[in-house]
Image (cartoon, rainbow, N blue to C red):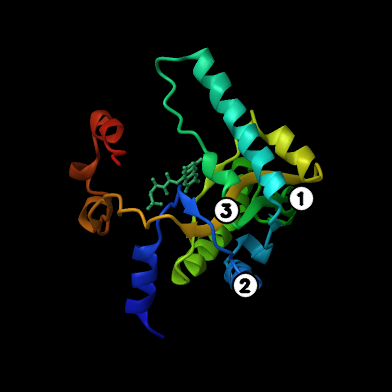
């Protein structure tokens, strides 16, 4: 066991949004999926389902779906809409649609509230995605979380024949980074860690929260 190596991989991972050509081999993909397979999940439900494509034509269609959403949103609110174009979804070796089997929520027997079930469900799938991303980073492959908003979900669902029993949560491109991005700032441990009880002095003001996300 080598914690320093693990931390190096964790620190190395970046959201990669510009890719160059180059194949993610079947062996690499297998290792990425193997890492996802070992993620912890609520009641060990393992609710993730991945639809994997290497088909460039399909990726270009996905890019067009996202571009159309971007254009529509920009048209609606040209001044305030600051969403970034997601061209990278059309430009990678492998594109993974991250889905979740929503019926798994019925298995969380000790949990009664729908919101609590939803937390277990999404956290379980997010764990698998994160483990996959770390495995990719360990091979110097780039990935990025791509949100699937309601505006694009139906078209993606139809294209990839995702059954209604499943939720379509995120898209994960995997490929070779054009250049490895610089790290974004991280909050110091002392800012988010509270010993014994929550330290109210550390409660951020609204302004701090809104000012935070810096590139
Ligand atoms: C749940 C989730 C959804 C995200 N959605 C998007 C997205 O739609 N598009 C995107 O470019 N990045 C997305 N990101 C990536 C974040 O912007 C990124 O992780 C964050 O800025 C930190 O940068 P880093 O991943 O390079 O460390 C998402 C991340 C998470 C965890």
Find residue 147 and report its horizontal and vertical position in percent: 55, 41
Q: Residues within 10 Å of mark 3 (few under 14, many from 20)?
A: many
Image quadrant holding the C terminus, namely top left
Cβ of mark 1 under 8 Å from ligand 1: the answer is no
Residue to which mark 3 is pinned: 92
**Residue 101: percent from left, percent from top:** 73, 52
Using a 10 Å C-alpha cutoff, classify the residue at mark 1 as few (fewer than 14 neighbours), some (14 to 19) or many (20 or more): few
Q: Residue at x 41, y 26 (%)?
A: 82
Q: Disc 2 marks which residue?
A: 34
- Mark 3 or mark 2: name the one nearer the start of the chain: 2
Q: Is residue 129 visible?
A: yes
Residue 179, position in %: x, y? 38, 56
Which label belongs to residue 51?
Answer: none
Closer to viewer: mark 1 or mark 2: 2
- Marks 3/2 in contact by CB < 8 Å: the verdict is no
User: Separation of disc 1 and disc 3 at Cα?
Assistant: 31 Å
For label 1, the SS is helix
The residue furthest front is 21
User: Which circle marks residue 103 in the picture?
Assistant: 1
Instruction: Specify the farthest residue to the bottom.
Output: 1
The Cα atoms of the two marked residues, 3 and 2, are separated by: 20 Å
SS label for mark 3: loop
Q: Which of label 3 and label 2 is nearer to you?
A: 3
């Amino acid at each position: 066991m080598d914690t320093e190596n693990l931390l190096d991989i964790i620190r190395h991972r970046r959201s990669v949004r510009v890719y160059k050509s180059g194949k993610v081999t079947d062996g690499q993909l297998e290792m990425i999926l193997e890492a996802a397979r070992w993620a912890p999940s609520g009641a060990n439900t393992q609710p993730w389902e991945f639809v994997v494509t290497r088909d460039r034509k399909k990726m270009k269609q996905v890019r067009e779906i996202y571009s159309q959403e971007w254009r529509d949103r920009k048209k609606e609110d040209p001044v305030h809409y600051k969403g970034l174009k997601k061209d990278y979804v059309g430009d990678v070796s492998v594109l993974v649609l991250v889905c979740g089997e929503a019926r798994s929520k019925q298995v969380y027997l000790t949990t009664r509230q729908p919101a609590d079930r939803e937390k277990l469900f999404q956290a379980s799938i997010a764990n698998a995605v994160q483990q996959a991303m770390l495995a990719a980073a360990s091979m110097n492959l780039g990935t990025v979380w791509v949100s699937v908003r309601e505006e694009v979900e139906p078209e993606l669902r139809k294209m990839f024949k995702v059954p209604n029993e499943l939720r379509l949560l995120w898209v994960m491109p995997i490929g070779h980074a054009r250049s490895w991005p610089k790290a974004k700032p991280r909050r110091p441990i002392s800012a988010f860690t509270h010993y014994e009880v929550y330290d109210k002095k550390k409660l951020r003001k609204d302004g701090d929260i809104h000012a935070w996300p810096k590139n």
